[in-house]
Amino acid sequence: MEKLLEHFNKLLQETKTDFHRYIYSQINWNSRMIGITGPRGVGKTTLILQYIKENLNPNTALYVTAEDFYFADHKLLDLADSYTKVGGKHLFIDEIHKYKNWSKELKLIYDYHPELKIIFTGSSILDINKGVSDLSRRAIMYQMQGLSFREYLQLFHQISTDIYGLQDIITHKVEIPESIHPLPLFQDYLKRGYYPFALEDTYDQRLRQIINQTLESDIPLYADMNVSTGRKLKQLLAIIAKSVPFKPNLSSIAEMLGASRNNIADYCLYIEEAGLISQLRDATGGVRGLGKVNKIYLDNTNLIYNLAHENSNIGNIRETFFFNQTRVIADVIASPASDFLINDITFEVGGKNKKQKQIQNIENSFVVKDDIEFGYMNIIPLWHFGMTY
């Protein structure tokens, strides 16, 4: 345990606390067991280290990562037993999906040590594994995604603004400091502002590494896939990147990959939960329900610029941004007449010359335009939808 403590203290010293992700204030940190899931690279590790540094006595808190070699011949349960005996009160476990039988051991720790609070993080694909449902009576789960445009402004440019809800946006209440021109900053955000590590010089390389690790390691390990199936995931993502947004023809994709049609739907679900694609569903089941998949997008605009290259057309980028940012605050489904439907409000997304034709006979509808700073009547700037969290 001495090595674990040494590693933890080093990380704690290096953790900065001048910027917090949106979810920091939403978490009920008093819960006895908390799970935080999200794609690689969105800042889950920093989030929990910040909480420890700002709120806890480091002598009664311990951070570990399930990837540590320590767990090659030690169990989490044994660590919890030993730690509580020396007065430990908070156990933080990062990358829990890398630990075999994690949900069973977490349940035992929870039941055996009522004096211990447990906070764990893991890949988004935990959300579709029965392990989470096994913990449903014990763990409070939170889903975290990448930076909003509002967070990007704060982290990258020290520009602080309020959070605005959907009703605020459609009634033109969004405000930023008068001296700021948002459009150049918005273009930079679309290319390299979604992940906090974009502050580093090696951003594109690191993002590609995250994509590869997710497809080659996280999903196959978690879904018990073999190496050849992991390769098919990469091929599938490449097909999606070249075609987005597209209406999926599962039979055609299955033929290209040499896989069954049913498997393709499963693969898409895994890649979606891992934070690499988003599937826009129709009204029959809602965003997380059983609705038929209407379109498949890459998850965020940074992935488009990293993966799609010459196929990164501006219409796709605009729709991807809108879908990515609004889904945090609402169920977003496909509109039968336009692009998106949120709470019976129709949104048509386009450039500054976009006309009203497609929505002219639809009540409660809005045109969302890129390349404009201010909105009026039923016309809303696209960048305003980046202020929702």
Image: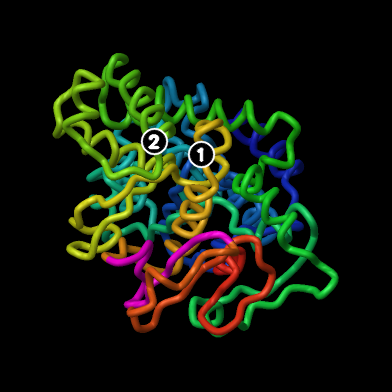
**Horizontal placement of 55 versus 131: left or right?**
right
Whole-percent x and y of residue 105?
A: 32, 40
Whole-percent x and y of residue 240?
A: 37, 34
**Residue mark closest to the camera, 1 vs 2:** 2
Q: Can residue 305 be seen in the rendering of this structure?
A: yes
Q: Label 1 vs label 2: CA separation?
A: 24 Å
The circle drawn on residue 243 is 2
The circle drawn on residue 263 is none
Q: Which residues are magenta?
A: 337-351
The amino acid type, in three-letter code, at marker 1 is Arg
The amino acid type, in three-letter code, at marker 2 is Ser
Q: Which residue is mark 1?
A: 40
Whole-percent x and y of residue 230?
A: 33, 21
Position above or below: 210 against 158:
above
Position above or below: 14 against 204:
below
Q: Can residue 116 be seen in the rendering of this structure?
A: no
The residue shown at (44%, 30%) is: 214
Position of the C terminus, as image quadrant, is: bottom right
